[in-house]
Amino acid sequence: MVRDHDSRTVLDLAVIGMICTAIIILMLSTKWSGEPSLGNRIFRLLGDASFTIYLFHEFFVSASLGIWSSMYKNTNPVAVLVGVTLIAIAGSSLVFYFVERPIISWLNQSRLARLKTA
């Protein structure tokens, strides 16, 4: 990715490194504190929705890249990467909470009802 020490590419790598470092620090700080924090809730959400994110991220990545490329032609690739990743995670998480979770709840209730009548 680094081409002849291009200052913009080096800056992009530095920004990505700082974002990754912030994520690691956030993960470590939520592990050491006993009380639930915003970071802990975010990681719990991502853990609960991880399979849905895995299944649906391609749709959101494809759609957001199509829209992004038609609207913003000359955008920093790092901004596109971060934006598309956030859109894919957010969209897939919404699918989890508004589609998968209600279906799972309904299936569990109908299963319990069958067990009570048996």
Image: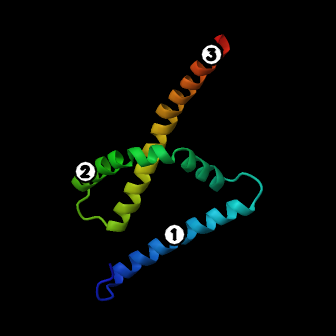
Kindly identify the residue that appears in the image at 51 percent across and 69 percent down: 20
Q: Is residue 52 left or right of residue 60?
A: right
- Whether 98 is drawn above or below 41: the answer is above
Nearest the eye: 31 or 74:
31
Q: Nearer the viewer, residue 31 or 107?
A: 107
Q: CA distance from mark 1 to mark 2?
A: 26 Å
Instruction: Choose the circle earlier in sequence order: 2 or 3.
Output: 2
- Marks 1 and 3, how far apart at CA: 47 Å
Q: Kindly identify the amino acid type of the residue bearing the numbered disc 2.
A: Gly
Q: Amino acid at mark 3?
A: Ala
Mark carried by residue 20: 1
The crowd level at tag 2 (other Cα within 10 Å; few <14, some 14-19, many 20+) is: few
What residue do we see at 43% from left, 49% from top? 54
Query: How far apart are the two marked residues, 2 and 3, measured between alpha carbons?
Result: 45 Å
Look at 52% across and 44% down and name the residue there. Answer: 49
In the image, which disc is placed on residue 113? 3
- For the N terminus, give its image quadrant: bottom left
Q: Nearer the viewer, mark 1 or mark 3?
A: 3
Residue 43: x and y in percent read 59, 53
Mark 2 — residue?
Answer: 66
- Looking at the picture, does residue 61 appear above or below residue 1? above
Please give left or right for residue 110 compared with residue 78 in the image. right
Disc on the earlier residue, 1 or 2: 1
In the picture as drawn, the residue positioned furthest to the front comes out as 118
Residue 46, how many percent across, how many down?
A: 54, 50
Q: How many marks?
A: 3
Q: Which quadrant is the C terminus positioned in?
A: top right
